[in-house]
Image (cartoon, rainbow, N blue to C red):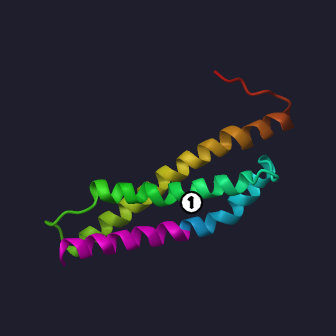
Amino acid sequence: MNELLRFLVELVGVLTISTAIIAYLRGVLRNILSNGCDEKNRGPDFWIRICDVMMLISPVIMVILFGHNDNVSLTAEVKRVLLLTLLGNFVGLTLVISVIWKYLVQPQLDRNVGFTTVTR
């Protein structure tokens, strides 16, 4: 398979998997963000779009940086792209989850228990 076609197939695979993950998480993310963001200023919509972009960009960057190798079989290449896609999505999700936890979940937990969060 020529190099450009192989890259395009990898890119389509990355974007398909990432889009499926985004679709799966969007409803839950909207609920969480609606509880912590100002609805009048469309805060949840902004953060959901940021999350979508992060979830698309992270795996694409991983595949572009570490993906293609001419010296491996097509099966090995597919495995590598799948691994890099999932790793990129994991990194993107970790970043998004850490922000949501820090600003929305942890303060809510502290209010429910009666503690205040100490920032350094």
User: Could you tell me residue 52's position as x and y percent?
Assistant: 56, 59
Which residue has dot 1 on it? 52
Front one among 9 and 78: 9
User: Could you tell me residue 103's position as x and y percent?
Assistant: 70, 39
Quadrant of the snapshot with the N terminus: bottom left
SS for callout 1? helix
On screen, residue 65 versus residue 70, left or right, reads: right
Quarter of the rendering containing residue 98 = top right
User: Could you tell me residue 108's position as x and y percent?
Assistant: 80, 40
On screen, residue 60 versus residue 18, left or right, reads: left
User: Could you tell me residue 40's position as x and y percent?
Assistant: 82, 52
Front one among 29 and 48: 48
Q: Which residue is drawn at 28% across and 55% down?
A: 66
For this orientation, the residue located farthest to the front is 41
For this orientation, the residue located farthest to the bottom is 1
Front one among 103 and 76: 103
Can residue 77 be found in the magenta stretch?
no
Give the prevailing secondary structure in the magenta stretch: helix
Quarter of the rendering containing residue 24 = bottom right
Q: What residue type is labelled 1?
A: Asp
Question: Mark 1: few, some, or many residues within 10 Å (few <14, many ≥20)?
Answer: many
Can residue 11 be found in the magenta stretch?
yes
Q: Which residue is drawn at 48% across and 57% down?
A: 89
Q: Residue at x 32, y 75 (%)?
A: 9
Quadrant of the snapshot with the C terminus: top right
Q: Which residue is drawn at 71% across and 23% down?
A: 118
The stretch of residues the image draws in magenta is 1-20
On screen, residue 44 versus residue 120, left or right, reads: right
